[in-house]
């Protein structure tokens, strides 16, 4: 669970999307720079936490989560 301390969680209430932003990139993210890397987004915060805690998971474009070996 320690991995989540390296992220800032933000909820966009207009789009109903949660973002997990790496702490070293949050100023760029909130200043409007959309060329960010490693920012994860989902409609559920639980999904973000699951992905952060399990770095071998990958999200496909259709939203399906798969486990890489």
Image (cartoon, helix red, strand yellow):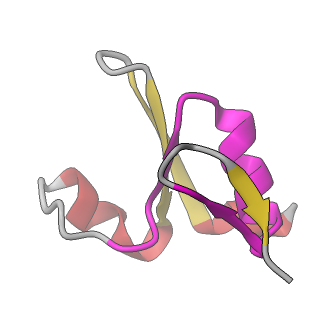
Q: Nearer the viewer, residue 18 or 60?
A: 60
Query: Is 15 left, or right, of 69 in this rendering?
Result: left
Q: What residue is drawn where x is 76% and y is 69%?
A: 3
Query: Is 19 left, or right, of 58 in this rendering?
Result: left
Residue 6 spot, x, y in % from top left: 62, 69
Q: Nearer the viewer, residue 55 or 22?
A: 55
Q: What residue is drawn where x is 35% and y is 62%?
A: 26
Residue 46: in magenta span: yes
Q: What residue is drawn where x is 14% and y is 56%?
A: 31
Query: Is 45 left, or right, of 55 in this rendering?
Result: left
Q: What residue is drawn where x is 76% and y is 60%?
A: 66
Query: Is 69 left, or right, of 18 in this rendering?
Result: right
Q: Which residues are magenta?
A: 37-60
Residue 60 lies in what quarter of the image? bottom right
Residue 8 spot, x, y in % from top left: 52, 53
Residue 28 spot, x, y in % from top left: 22, 66
């Amino acid at each position: 669970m320690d991995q989540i301390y390296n992220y800032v969680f933000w909820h966009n209430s207009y789009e109903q999307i949660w973002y997990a932003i790496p702490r070293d990139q949050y100023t760029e993210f909130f200043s409007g720079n959309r060329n960010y890397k490693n920012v994860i987004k989902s409609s559920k915060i639980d999904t973000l936490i699951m992905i952060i805690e399990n770095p071998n998971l990958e999200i496909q474009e259709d939203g399906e989560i798969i486990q890489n070996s």
